[in-house]
Amino acid sequence: MKKILLLMLSICIGFLAYSQDRSQIPKELRNLSKVREYKNPTDPTPPMENIYIAPSPVYKDARVFYDETEIIETVYDLQTNTMLGNRFWVHSDSTMGAVCTRGFEDPNFPDRGTGYNYFDGTQWGPIPSERIEDIRCGWPSYAAWGPTGEIVVSHNGVTGLEISKREVKGTGEWTQTNYQGPAGIENDPTWPRMTTNGENNEYIHIFYNSYVEYAGQSQALLYTRSMDGGETWFPQDIILEGMGEDYYSGISADDYVLASRGDVVALLIASPFKDMFIMKSTNNGEDWEKILIWEHPYPFWDFTTTFTTDTLWSPDNSGAIAIDANGMCHVVWGVGRVARLIYDPPDPGYYQYWAYTDGIGYWNEAMDEIEPLSNPHRTLSSENLEEEGMLIGWAQDINGNGTIDIDEYDLMTYRELGLSTMPSITIDDNGIIALAYASVNEDAYNIVTYFYYKRVWVRTSPDLGYTWGDFYDVTEDDFYDYDECIYPLFAKNSTVTDFHLIFNADFYPGLYLDEDHDPYLNRVIHSSLLKDEIVSVNDPDLVNLSDITVSQNYPNPFSGTSVVMVELTELSNLSIEVFNLMGQKVYVYNAGIVGSGVHKLTIDGSNLQSGVFFYTVKADENSVTRKMIVN
């Protein structure tokens, strides 16, 4: 009995160490709406004055948690219309490649194209001085290709997609080919998302936007695949079932992001104006399944005719997806709030949004579809997500007074609408998830534009998303006192010891390409985050043994039933037992002999009194005990 009580005490201490209080946004700001015009995304070439900004190297010293290097520079700063593409890859030999849309020459950036840099295992190359393509391009995706090579897919805005490859990463000439779409959009494929998989990365998967009306939609999303490194394509230029005109009036630019791992390929669609869902293939793109995360109450939204009776909680135009080692998809998104209120109608083509809506939501395939509550319009509210344990990021209370202190006129919003936004996630082979997102900093202010700066925050989960640890400011160094830090992007794979992140930093909040400020140099920064410093895997409440990983029960606290996820590396006899504070066993469930992988165990608490309990998961000789609360 003494042993049990000592274990319980140690678990309580660990649990308290990881509790996090969400800071509050003042009510007057939460209820403040703005009106914005929805513009069908175009490949922007705004009228700008002739300027020249000479690249200037910036060198950073290693810090406690991070080792940072500037790798690319650009004045052209619009890296996405909504969600970030796959622009960063850690190769199996721990070398790395990163790309962005790069441009310096005004007007209209005729030099725009893919800025590329390569880490050879020791250091990054020089900051690039030109694009890799021989034609004006943008919106690159980057991935490994073949046993030792690399591939970039971008669009040129005139004759389709540009595919650049080379057989040896980091060296040699790029081989460039052009890819055009089917009849009706031959020259218009735009905003591609590309990834590779297979034993030698021979499968190439591309989703691209039609840009023009196609197949009954204002803009369609088409899929094409190569199984031989790009020599042939099959299937080619198809719209997957569940994404066509019978389901959506259109899927717009960059409302989608792509991930791959092993034989699994998954596409996330997220927008304030359509369903949030996954298209998933477990056989390298041969077959696809649609997995609905959140059903939009207005499935055929129209900015002229659609009106809402209430505000709509939704994704804020940002989101990301990653796949764990068991092939399960994990999704994050910025929490947004929009409307076209019938009693206060905006002009046609405009909509209302609430810029001070805050939060980063989280979902994985072990969870059910996010069901509507009494009011279906509030399903994705920050409060609901927090109650369900699905709110994992928010603006930080830097000065510790319990509220976020910002003025209503001094917040810069992007095409991504939330206060905390632009999330990215990655998952290592041990089930550790790293989340990065951009969020307003109440103590950082631009004295020229009078806007608050955003910073990049990182948070980790050691157990496939069931518990989350502390928040870390990647940009806390004094060097970033006068920088707007946005577009954080994790490489979807990591090394044994590090997570790898890139982000943009520049002096002015907002985007030059949206004419929010004067042209200014953007620096793409690489950060190497040491897992031992930011992941509390040794805490007694966050257990990840070599043969068994056990999550915190979800939801917690709960009444009725709660779920525990267990990951096994081998065939085991699996069971769960629940004890009260007196050490008495009050619930037992034996799953029997099960194979390796992730398993869901359900605790039935309907006959348990309210209070604190402990559950022990046993898998052969391994056992893990954790705390739970019954309401």
Image (tube, grey):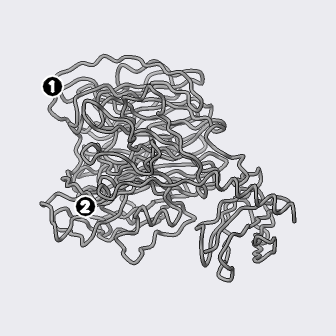
Residue kind at label 2, given as amino acid type: Gln
Q: Where does label 1 land, which residue?
A: 49
Crowding near the residue tagged with mark 2, few <14, some 14–19, many ≥20 C-alpha atoms within 10 Å: some
Residue 276 drawn at (x, y percent): 40, 62
Q: Is residue 622 above or below residue 208?
A: below
Position of residue 556 in the picture relative to residue 410 (left or right):
right
Residue 238: quadrant of the picture: bottom left
Crowding near the residue tagged with mark 1, few <14, some 14–19, many ≥20 C-alpha atoms within 10 Å: few
Looking at the image, the residue that sits furthest to the left is 347
What number is the disc on residue 177? none
Nearest to the observer: residue 6 or residue 370:
6
N-terminal of the pair, mark 1 or mark 2, is: 1
Nearest to the observer: residue 172 or residue 79:
79
Q: In which quadrant of the rendered image does the N terminus lie? A: bottom right
Residue 363 drawn at (x, y percent): 51, 60
Nearest to the observer: residue 260 or residue 160:
260
The answer to whether residue 196 shows anywhere in this view is yes
Position of residue 478 in the picture relative to residue 15 (left or right):
left
Residue 154 drawn at (x, y percent): 35, 38
Could you tell me which residue is drawn at 56 percent across and 24 percent down?
62
Q: Kindly indicate whether the residue at mark 2 contacts the one at mark 1 (C-beta within 8 angstroms).
A: no
Looking at the image, the residue that sits furthest to the front is 401
Could you tell me which residue is drawn at 25 percent across and 51 percent down?
183
Q: Where does label 2 land, which residue?
A: 217
Residue kind at label 1, given as amino acid type: Glu
| Secondary element at tag 2 | loop
